[in-house]
Image (cartoon, rainbow, N blue to C red):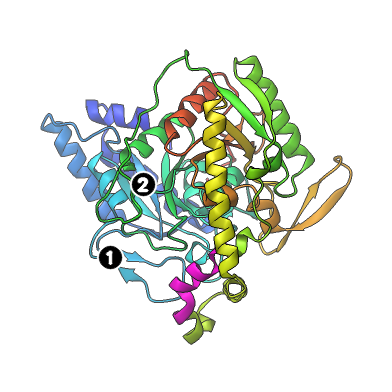
Amino acid sequence: MALTDAATIASRVRSGRLKAVDVVAEAINDAIESHDVLNAFTLIDRSGAMARAKGIDMLVEAGKDPGPLAGVPVALKDLIDQAGLPNTRGSSFEAQVAENSATVVRRLGAQGAVIIGRTGLHEFAFGFTSENPWFGPVRNPWDPTTSSGGSSGGSAVAVAAGITPIAIGTDTGGSVRVPAAMCGIFGLKVTHGRVPLTGVYPLIASLDTVGPMARTVDDITVAYLAMAGPDSADGWSHYREVVPPRNTTSTKFTIGVVEQWANLGPSSTETRHAIAGFLESASRAGFTVEVVSDETLSPPKRLANASGAEILGVHGARFSEHRGGYGADLQERLDQCADGTPEDMIEAVAWAVAAANTVDRLAGKGINLLIAPTVGGNHKAIGEDTMQIHTTDIHTSETFFHRQLLASFTAPINRIGLPSLAAPIAQESGLPFSVQLIAPKWHEHTILEAAKRLESSGIFASGVPPRAFT
């Protein structure tokens, strides 16, 4: 796409200098042309998207403002309802045709966005690779032999490959941030309860979130502001003020490097060096950096077992009757869900409250941002369950099960309920490494203000993968 940022597209469409139908047609063509290589979409809604784009152009011609996302093509995870379209949830089971669109879909449309299609994902959003047994693997535009990450892999690929400026995913244990990291873009996990879940198929409703993915902080921001806010139809929704980020240079940011979060899982030598370089650059840009050590931030060993009962509440009956309708990896994971105990759940809930209180206390002391790696390694071969990384130097490597590297740093943040942005650390070439910026609950604006300053300083920048499909 010639115009890759949403702000530029919307500005030109609103002024009449650019036709929404032309922008949307180009995005649709890119989605189709890339399909055999990237497999990012499960459905492309050409007729619906073009009709919507035509309607936006008619509003502009009539002197009306379609909104801050006017004519911007958006990709939507195939887990979120759109009226009249099938919601496959990435599964083998019969797709459900939605009668009503999810709240986030309606809100994006009200701001002028045009959803061009539905994106591939890990089956039922329960995994981190998007290697789907029913729809095929979603492939990373940096190297189509490697995983896009998951579970919102198709959404990340649509953005990274330049098909759409913005895509929407869901994040329960890292499903926005992990593919954002694997594809070299930004991905925002919001505070639980900030963006409505109405019309979103659940995995763990007490942890599920909906969030945007984009190549720039401005595009993340405009999509977030379009979707955020309370919804009376969603019992998880909170009636908290949505504070827009300010364009200010006066805010003082102190980054806390949490010792307990740096070692949540294994990480590559390259990842650690990239984050150390990020901290040095941030310090030169005026950010204060402090080391934080607090055992209340160290998660319980059986944290992953705490959600088993909730997952089985969604899948248990169907799984017992139609086991073969689930892919092999989900069969294994759903079997493991039965290992969770009430004690695991109670311990996890108690830890989450204590950890959130600690984050608030640190903010009260002026440490208004915390960091952690997003993933421990960003190169996973499709079809392999393991990943190899350098752990001591670039000449020696170790092998780990992929979820150790892809989930360890993100899942605890979901349990606490904090907002977090996966951000690409700028480098001269190649896939950028990713760091999480984390803040207290309801402080998405703090993260976005800091990220914008870091982006403006050249410290954050999305990578540009080769467009193999052209």
Give me the disc on residue 98: 1
**Which residue is located at x 61 percent, y 46 percent?**
182
Tag 2: amino acid: Val
Which quadrant of the figure has residue 16? top left
Name the one closer to the observer, 112 or 411. Answer: 411
User: Which structural element holds mark 1?
Assistant: loop
Front residue (pair 132, 284):
284
What residue type is disc 1 on? Answer: Ala
Picture residue at 57% right of the left edge, 31% below the top: 362
Front-most of 124 and 462?
A: 124
- Residue 292 place in picture, x, y as percent: 67, 32
Residue 453 horizontal side relative to residue 73, left or right: right
- Mark pair 2, 1: CA separation: 20 Å
Quarter occupied by residue 355: top right
Q: Is residue 407 above or below residue 289?
A: below
Name which residue lies at 66% across and 21% down.
281
Left or right side of 370 for 44: left
Is 307 colored magenta in this rendering?
Answer: yes
Residue 113 image position (x, y, % from top left): 29, 42
Q: Earlier in the sequence, mark 2 or mark 1?
A: 1
In the image, residue 41 sits, relative to residue 187, either above or below, namely below
- Whether residue 343 appears in this view of the structure is yes
Point out the stretch of residues depicted in magenta: 306-318
Locate residue 265, reporting x and y percent. 72, 50
Tell me if I can see residue 164 in this picture: no
Which residue does the image show at 25% across and 54% down from the upper left?
A: 48
376 relative to 286 in the view: left or right: right
Residue at far bottom of view: 321
On the image, which quarter does residue 65 sit in?
top left
Residue 8: image location, x then y, percent: 36, 27
Which residue bears the numbered disc 2?
A: 195
